[in-house]
Amino acid sequence: MLSGRPATLVHQAGLLDAPGPLDPRALSRTCRLREAVYALIRAWPLAPAADSAVREALAEVNEAARLPLPRHQLEEAGHLTRTGGVDEVLGAVARDALDLLSGADFARLRECLNEDCTRLFVDLSRSANRRWCGMAECGNRHKVANYRKRRRQGAG
């Protein structure tokens, strides 16, 4: 079974209810897609003279977007089940990436300002000036560090 963090992330994202097996090959495919999406986002929109690595990233994401999507089924009691495997997860992620790149939300895409974080997020705040991927982690760490710095300066 998909164990640890990958399974948790797939479940939290609402892609699958019970993520299936993740062998080393599947993990490698997942990492390749993640890196391709990141490279593509960093280089988007593509310049006519985009390097071959970025063009390969586009091909990788387009190929993954042709994979099947997770299967959804509504039970009589009203419970939605989402099933599939690695291919379905990769297909859903790639299609979401393509929708983001080709849609209006791309202009609101940001990278977390925490130097130790590599997360990207769509800033849907009214003022469009969000700096952190989330307050629970990166934003809170920044606030705590600033508070401690102010306390040290005030004491000294």
Image: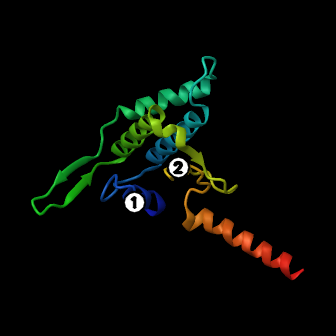
Disc 2 residue type (three-letter): Asp
Q: Nearer the viewer, residue 47 or 105?
A: 105
- Name the quadrant of the N terminus: bottom left
Q: Farthest residue toward the right? A: 156
Residue in the picture at 51% in, 28% down = 58
Is 145 positioned to the left or the right of 82 in the image? right
Residue 124: x and y in percent read 49, 50
Q: Residues within 10 Å of mark 1 (few under 14, many from 20)?
A: few
Q: Farthest residue toward the bottom? A: 155
* On screen, residue 156 above or below 68: below
Is 145 positioned to the left or the right of 88 in the image? right
* On screen, residue 128 above or below 18: above
Q: Residues within 10 Å of mark 2 (few under 14, many from 20)?
A: many
User: Label for residue 123?
Assistant: 2
Q: Nearer the viewer, residue 145 or 85?
A: 145
Residue 123: x and y in percent read 52, 49
Residue 16: x and y in percent read 32, 54
Disc 1 residue type (three-letter): Gln
Q: Nearer the viewer, mark 2 or mark 1?
A: 2
User: Label for residue 12?
Assistant: 1
Q: Quadrant of residue 6?
A: bottom left
Label 2 close to label 1 by CB (< 8 Å): no
Q: Farthest residue toward the left? A: 76
* On screen, residue 45 above or below 100: above
